[in-house]
Image (tube, helix red, strand yellow):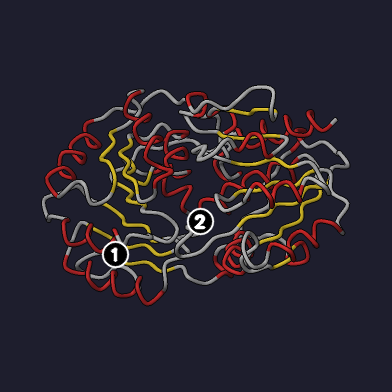
Amino acid sequence: MRNNPNGSISFFPGSSQFRAKTPNFGVDRMRNNQRVAFITHAGLSIGGGHIIRCFALAEAFGSLGTSIRWIVNSEAHKILLKYGAQQTSFTVVDKPFGDGAAAALSTVSRLSLDICIVDSYDASPSFLTELRRYAPVALIDDCRGRPVERDCDILLNYNLNAKLLGYESGQAELLLGPEYALLRSEFWDLKPEKGDTILIIPGASDILNTGEQFIKWWRKDWPGAELVLGPLVESSKAMRLAGAALNSPNLSVVYNPPDLPSRMAKARSVLCTSSVTSYEALALGKPLAVFQTADNQVEIGAEIERLGLGRNLGFWGTWDEIALNKALHYLVNRQPSANPVNPRGAQSAARMIIAILK
């Protein structure tokens, strides 16, 4: 549905509309013989951040001629197919860090890998120890809930606060900071444009149902905005929220758009969770306001505000319509900020990992 009299509602739920184009890497492409596997997951309660940043790093490895294999749960598998990953490169294991851990480890044992990249807070020390019997392990982390650098060979944390978390030197090789931001290839050469719309992006699954509250709060005299619902939001919920937004002439609901990078490039500013999406906005120099729907996002949001890169509203449920209105004034009046994020950070990370392996 599109272009109704009271607002604009767009749906892009089908995978056939969500194929990533093969990027033209030109002379930057180089051949190597590395074989890399990713073990990660996604879902309504897990979110989509793990799989999205792994996909970005896989694109970077692919641009350098690396062979990629995926060991993921069914929800992550669906997202990767929508992104255009090859069906033949998958092993689908539900609960790869739980009941399916033995199957995931068995798969790795047969692959003859150069490195295995893991992205999950559920990867236990015992799982990682067993995994390292078959290949070196690179772990993607963003909160250091425990001294995870003791459980891997390479530790990658691209967040603004990564160097403040106390990772111990002498354990794993450390790749820290936004020089290694894991942004998808669509963002590598994307240029920002001037626009009038505020993008509201509450995450791949909108785990705390924030979209419905944004619609209830949105006033007719507020700036024009698009509420972007991610691929893990159920289509029935997206339809319901689209109907709820019909009475707002300045708020559109967009479901699973294939052109999200270009929409962000053309946006006036971005309001999103302090997740990988916030780094995409920072890479484009967009005025930014963030909020949190998961504990691992809290310190990142605080660091964004401390560094003067955006406004931090805080954890969902701790602020209200009045605070949102103030944040909107900030987003409307804020000028584009300096960009601390390397748009090609995924390639920098892939090159460093290959160099470490050699």
Q: Nearer the viewer, residue 312 or 61?
A: 312
SS category of the residue bearing label 1 = loop
Residue plotted at (26% across, 30% down): 334
Which of the two discs, 2 and 1, sits closer to the camera?
Answer: 2
Image location of residue 29, percent across then percent down: 78, 37
Q: Quadrant of the N terminus?
A: bottom left
Q: Nearer the viewer, residue 35 or 318?
A: 318
Residue plotted at (62% across, 63% down): 98
SS category of the residue bearing label 2 = loop
Image location of residue 88, percent across then percent down: 78, 66
The answer to the question of whether label 2 and label 1 lie on touching residues, with beta carbons closer than 8 A, is: no
Please determine whether, in this image, residue 226 is positioned above or below residue 3. above
Residue plotted at (15% across, 39% down): 326
Identify residue type, mark 2. Gly
Image location of residue 201, percent across then percent down: 36, 52
Q: Is residue 111 left or right of residue 332?
A: right
The crowding category of the residue bearing disc 2, from other C-alpha atoms within 10 Å (few below 14, some 14 to 19, many at least 20), is many
The answer to which image quadrant residue 218 occupies is: bottom left
Q: Is residue 291 left or right of residue 35?
A: left
The crowding category of the residue bearing disc 1, from other C-alpha atoms within 10 Å (few below 14, some 14 to 19, many at least 20), is many
Identify residue type, mark 1. Ser
Q: Nearer the viewer, residue 287 or 160?
A: 160
Q: Quadrant of the C terminus?
A: top right
Image location of residue 345, percent across then percent down: 60, 33
Q: Who comes first in sequence, dot 2 or dot 1? A: 1
* Residue under pointer 1: 8
Mark 2–mark 1 Cα distance, whole angstroms, equals: 25 Å
Please determine whether, in this image, residue 154 is positioned above or below residue 101. above
Q: Is residue 299 left or right of residue 321?
A: right
Please determine whether, in this image, residue 358 is positioned above or below residue 296. above
Please tell me the numbered disc located at residue 110. none
* Residue under pointer 2: 48
